[in-house]
Amino acid sequence: MLVIFDCDGTLIDSEIIWAKATIEVFAEEDLEMELDEYNGTYAGMTNREIIQQIEEEIERSLPHDIMQRIEDRAMQKIEKLEVIEGAHELLDMLDYPRCICSNTGSEMLEANLRRTNLWDRFRPYVYSAMEVGTKAPKPDPNVFLHAASTLDVAPDQCFVLEDSVHGVHAASEAGMRVIGFIGASHTYPGHGEHLMDAGAETVIRRLVDLPATLEALKEWQDK
């Protein structure tokens, strides 16, 4: 059995940083958006996908430098990056092999995991979707299938912890079982329901509840 973690918004509380940075930059372009609205619509998407979708919705192009401005704004806030409560305690409790599958680039993944003292708890089993396999990001199952193949575990023996609808879709499409996570700062009303509708079998709010949840789902599978 393999336990696969998303990273942003699941292990580290970074989704809220990028959400706030994006909303601030959008406001400079006369695009007003509430935080819950942004999180409910765009959580788990790459910046490029978000910009493309918004341009389609507003039927005009945004400035060519907007993604760089969002990244620069987020980097100003990144020093406040924190590990999600219970992450280290969970990893102390978890007996199964584990890895990370994320849409974030590998350099930023490593930097953020080092900031939160998580890098040594996963390396080298940290996979960036756009750098492995077909290079397709979630909601494509690419990164999950790559991890399962690399670690020689059948997809149906993998459990995935995800905080985004895109991630849940990707893991489900890969033939894996998914647990939704709604315990980070970017969670929003209806978050759990959205994850369940996307294919999560259950949701948890506390990371330390994951081991017991895994055992319960595994027992149900074995019956």
Image: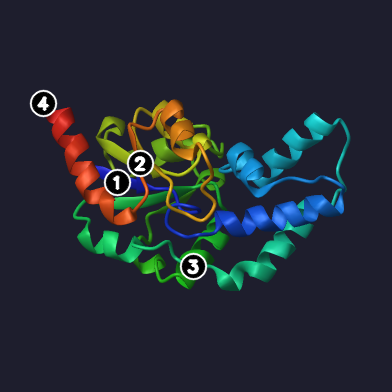
Residue that protrudes farthest toward the front in the picture: 189
The Cα–Cα distance between marks 3 and 2, rounded to whole angstroms, is 22 Å
Q: Quadrant of the N terminus?
A: top left
Question: Reading the chain from its start, which is encountered first: label 2 or label 1?
Answer: 1
Residue under the image location 49 percent in, 52 percent down: 9
Residue beneath label 3, please?
82
Q: How is the image coloured?
A: rainbow
The answer to which quarter of the image holds residue 79 is bottom right
Residue beneath label 1, please?
3
Do the numbered discs 3 and 2 sit on residues whose CB atoms are within 8 Å? no
Judge depth for marks 3 and 2 and give the one in front: 3
The Cα–Cα distance between marks 2 and 1, rounded to whole angstroms, is 6 Å
Q: Is residue 91 above or below residue 150?
A: below
Q: Can residue 66 be spotted in the picture?
A: no
Q: Horizontal and vertical percent for residue 135?
A: 56, 40
Amino acid bearing label 1: Val
Disc 1 element? strand
Residue beneath label 2, please?
160
Do the numbered discs 2 and 1 sit on residues whose CB atoms are within 8 Å? yes
The Cα–Cα distance between marks 3 and 1, rounded to whole angstroms, is 22 Å
